[in-house]
Amino acid sequence: MMYEERIEEIDLQRYWLVLKRRWRPAAVVFALSLVAALMASSSQKSLWTATAKLLLHNNQTSELTGVAQNLGDLNSLKGTSDPLATQAEIIFSLPILEATIEALDLRDADGELLAPSSLASELTVEPLGETDLIAISYRSGDPELSALVVNQIMNSYVEANINAQRSEVIAAREFLEYELPRAQREADSLSAALKLFNQGNGIISLTEEAGASVDAIADIDSQINQIQVNLIEAESRSSQLSSRLGMTSQQARALATVTETPAVQSALAQLQETRSELATALTRYTPAHPSVRALQRQEQASINVLRSRVGEVVGPGTSAGLLGMSDIDRNLADQLVQAELNRESAYNQLAALVETRDAYQQQGEEIPLLKQTQDELVQRRDAAQADLENLRLRLQEVLLAEKQLVGSARVVEQAVPPASATVDGKAKYLLAGAVVGTLLGIATAFFLDLIDRSLKTVKDGEKIFGYTLLGVIPRFELDSQPPLVNMATEDGLPSPRIVTLSGAYPMLSGAYQMLQANLRFISSDKKLKALVMTSSVAGEGRSEVCANLAAAVAQTNRRVLLVDADMRSPSQHHLWNLINAVGLSHVLVGEGRLEKALQPVTTNLTVLTAGVVPPNPMALLDSERMATLIELFRGEFDYIVFDTPSLAGSADAAVLGNLVDGVLMVMRPLHVPYDRALAAKTLLERSGARVLGMIANGVDSKNDFGEYAYDERELTSTASHVVPDFQLEAPSSLADSSLVEKDPLEAPSSLVEKEPHVFHKRP
């Protein structure tokens, strides 16, 4: 992932820090913008402004006469638009400006007619508050000309307003005169169509016909109900008689037909007479008597004759037994026939009534359609006649409006030459300069911050290195010393930058105490004794952090050795005000003894200076002698802190880091470039050294935020900027060594002198 994608995140606090870091160039750009705005406003010439007022109103004459009342009204198509603003834009229109230029013969410096845009640039038209007034102002270098221009613009607008309304009236009259004959023809055509429709459908009054049809249907329904009752009665009577006689209605009808035939009646009478004689004979004789037998044969012959004659009338298959019925049965048979006739008559009447009712209903269904068509024709005829009358009325109104037309604008205040000139635009220029200056200042700040490739905040360092942040050392400056002074004082005392010695800066001392506590936390499983401290580039305050950390650890009653392993540009002897006569380089090449090189500076703290600068420091550090020396230091001290060169162009720290327990990286915001930081990280990764974490040094509260910010007053609230008297005693002795004095690395029974190094304040 690219650097910009990781650290240039959308963060308002980060943007605020950019402005805080680059406020000086941003302020310069802002000041230059204001100066430019002031110079631009001072170069403006004096102008004379003339003002007049114009009243806009609806056509009051039309309201009084009642003719063409909407003509000339100030209406808008949109409910949210302002009619006065619309009229103000019309005043700015090209025809009004051109009419004014031609009327006053306004010309430019070349003698040509003035361009409308030039006239409009100095013209101001705006509605006045909640009134119906419009203020028109014009400014120029001539007061008389300003007044003439304003008055002429109003005159041109009023004249254009009247002409516009007159053209509307003329267009309306011509339209009405064209539409009136067409409306007359349409009204006549619709009246004729309605008349033909009524005649073609035989319509006199559809309303009355509809009422009569409803009454007829109701009467027919009543008759149908009565016929249905009669039909039910006839069917019931016929069923009863048929059941009683044991014959159907067809048989009863056949019987009636047979009995009414003369031949059948004659045969039937003869049969009855024979049966009467047979009955009389049976009373006198026995059934076997010849007379009885003769009458029986005669009876059978009469029956055969009767059957033959019945068959001739109604056809074969009719039982002759029906002819032997009694008079009562015959009467009932006649009633059955009559009931059947009544039933058939009632059924026929019912069918006829239903057919008549259906016809009336069909006619009733057609009436609404005819009514709808008729109503449509009537409505169209009435609308056409109403349009005709309206056109006639509007034509009369328009003809009257042509004679009484007045405009909807009136001049209420003429422009007069102004008495004094004004210089406009100063406030606008200043405001514009302030706005532009602010934007340019912000842009300048961000541009400078963008081209600055350094790590700007502690969080940037955390994201780039990916190391654990072990400590944050605030940036501080001494009142009596220039910034970043790391030399010892002239009175023989250590540099006041070693703040953990004097206790004058409690906050700084607390930061180093927090650092040593974090070191203990990360080494809870394995004790750390030898540490290498390095940085990406020179000038990040690495040596100062080493000195303060060593002093802070020594104050916890632990024996600490501070080794200046920066044999390229040593600085620990300057910080501690020591003599660099015999140092690490002397010991490693065998030209100095270790007990002479070790210099106790305070209780529990010993410093081993760098010695003379060798031609190849890395060869000395990456040697068996150096490894042996480190093992010797491990047995004699609780902590060994190595101050090594920066990783920019030097691998000393990476090489030495493989011989100790871990490496500490010092990072100073706004000091180390991005590419140098990546190169240092890559070098440490390739070397295989164990990186314990990162120390942020020189953190500025104006440059950081969140948990890294602090109150600058805390740095000086309890600080004494006068370095106190030093009388710091070194430890009486260190542990005995058993090494033989054949090699400069071999130490005597005591690595340090019996007399400790004592700092005395010079008089």
Image (spheres, rainbow, N blue to C red):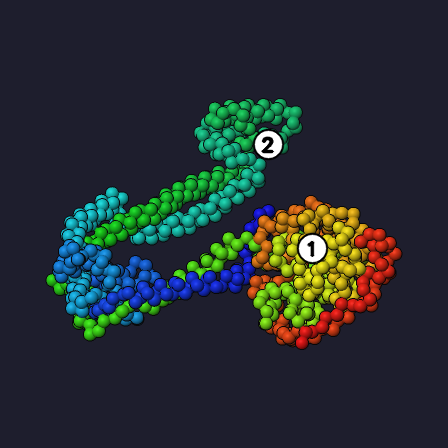
Task: Name the residue: 62% across, 58% down.
Answer: 540
* Residue 362 shown left or right of residue 524 in the figure: left
Q: Position of residue 74 (x, y in %)?
A: 25, 63
Residue 113 seen anywhere in this rendered image of the structure? no
Above or below, comparing residue 497 to residue 298 in the picture? below
**Neighbour class for label 2 at 10 Å: few (<14), some, many (≥20)?**
some
Q: Quadrant of residue 548?
A: bottom right
Q: Is residue 368 above or below residue 15?
A: above
Q: Decide if residue 165 is on the left or right side of residue 622.
A: left
Q: Nearer the viewer, residue 79 or 488?
A: 488
The answer to which quarter of the image holds residue 402 is bottom left
Taking depth in this image into account, of 651 and 351 the one nearest to the observer is 651
Where is mark 1, residue-wise? 612
Disc number at residue 65? none
Quarter of the image with the C terminus is bottom right
- Crowdedness near tag 1: few (<14), some (14–19) or many (≥20) residues, C-alpha within 10 Å: some
Q: Secondary structure at mark 1?
A: loop
Q: Amino acid at mark 1?
A: Val
Q: Which circle's residue, 1 or 2, is located before the other in the chain?
A: 2
Badge 2 is on which residue? 279
Spot occupied by residue 607 in the image (x, y as percentages of width and height)? 74, 62
Q: Nearer the viewer, residue 534 or 572?
A: 572
Q: Nearer the viewer, residue 33 or 385?
A: 33
Is residue 368 visible in the rendered structure shown here? yes
Q: Is residue 746 left or right of residue 418?
A: right
Dividing the picture into quarters, in which one does residue 477 lie?
bottom right
Q: Residue at x 71, y 56 (%)?
A: 611
Q: Position of residue 426 (x, y in %)?
A: 32, 68
Residue at 35% across / 47% down in the picture?
364
